[in-house]
Amino acid sequence: MKRIITVFVFTLVFVLLISSGANVFAAGKSIEAFKCNNYSGTNDCQKMISEITGYDSAYSSYYKSSSFSQSDLTGKSRCIKYWSGHGNNSGQLWGDNCPTISVMGINNFKWSGSNLEFIFFAACRQLDGSGLNPRAKYANAMIGNNAVRVICGYHEDAPAAGPDVTVAYNFMQKAKTGESVKSSWIQANQMVSNYYYCVLTHSGNVQFSRFPGFPGLTYTRPGASSTTILRFSSANPTGTLQPLTSGAPSLEALLQSVEIPNFSLRATDVDFYVNSNIKTTVLKIGNYLTTQNNEIGDKEVCISEEEAVSITKKWLKDAYSGVTWNDFNDGELLVIPIVMAEVDLDGNVENEREVVIAYDISLISMFDGIPVYDDKYCTIVDDTGVISSAISHRTYKVVKNENNKGVLNKETIEKKLVSSGVDLNGIEKCSLAFMDEDGDDIFDPVLSVKTSDCRTTRLNLITGKISVC
């Protein structure tokens, strides 16, 4: 009789919990991903899911690529949410298969209070403080009992289709080593030359949170009393150019500043390695050989940009063999401060005091004054020295194209772009680089233009091929 009474009491308590609306949480290992745009091949959402479930089979997953609704964005039943599409700093999200969702118009928007702990936006300007300041909206949504730990995204342009898959892959390789979500996201974007990353976290050790089941320390999930949200981003969120960093030219200025090459480059691998006497964590990620010494912290640095560059040069000389600074053909040097500030939850950006907590440094290989995509040496440096580094480098030989079908003058380039649907007056950014678009180790000159509709159009100047993403 005593056993029967015990079972009855347990059942009654469970029923009361359900009927009272109390939060009964599901298992923490879960991910959902939403792909708003059409894409041929494995997309970034699928890559993120496969890397997580491949590492830990205990994770459940949910994937959606059509029939979106606002509840897909606001839902919080799973631990990790990954959202990929277009966006702007009016807090709007949309895509080929997704109607416009206006985040700023969602009343009483809260992601806290359930299972959701990590959010990723592969969409432009969702963590921008200008415009309608969607960053403050998202920061407020993090706060509450069972709070969201981290939001990763961009304060300006997100990577185009293709590079966004690489970011997801790079991120997961770093995360699997025990690197925090915050540091892994910043380093993953640095390797694809996207310098518009932004991460929101709570203050304190929770900023170093990892996914459930991944290596490294697990910190207590923030409660309702945690109301200080920090942002970590490349400087500056408003896009102000930094010393030693050049801006993107207009299409006309770009075409006038360089002689459009009528040749391609054939890449040959270079044998380089990390010296065995260096105490560091070495990891091969795609074409990159990386080192990891520390986490990106939250303390203001004392070193200058010039000192950070000197530290970067010394690390290359001391840590690596088979590659030198001069091997990057008088490459383009970018020095971008990584800043931290407390997010003003009332949306008053002018109250957010930025401090430099590290430097993002990249030396990008050039050939005849044109960057070679994915050939670079990069580091993140603070007062402790080199936090992380990554090198991808090969040698290149000119390949003449006897049957060149490309577009080699301004008029034909503009005509090609217009025929593909590009509004020349709507071009916001453009760049020219040698790129290996099909994995055959042949790098063709490729013109990339980003337009105000958030689309990136690539024109191969040798083959004349156009791709839109």
Image: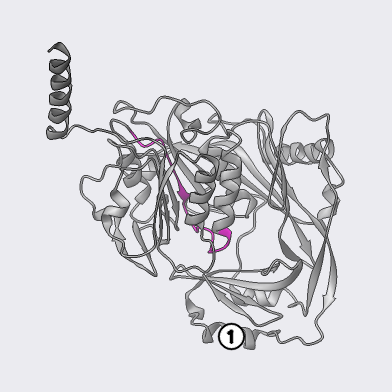
What residue range appears in magenta? 147-163
In the figure, residue 180 lies in which quadrant? top right
Magenta stretch: residue 261 in it?
Answer: no
Magenta stretch: residue 154 in it?
Answer: yes
In the image, what residue type sits under mark 1?
Lys
**Image coords of residue 91 (percent x, y):** 34, 56
Quarter in which the N terminus is drawn: top left
In the figure, residue 146 lies in which quadrant? top left
- Residue drawn where x is 27% and y is 59% of the image: 69
Which residue is denoted by mark 1 in the rendering?
A: 416
- Residue drawn where x is 73% and y is 63% of the image: 372
**Image coords of residue 110 (percent x, y):** 27, 42
**Image coords of residue 420 (percent x, y):** 52, 83
Q: Which residue sits furthest front?
A: 1
Examine the residues drawn in magenta and state their main secondary structure.
loop
Whether residue 234 is visible: no
348 up-or-down from 406: above or below: above
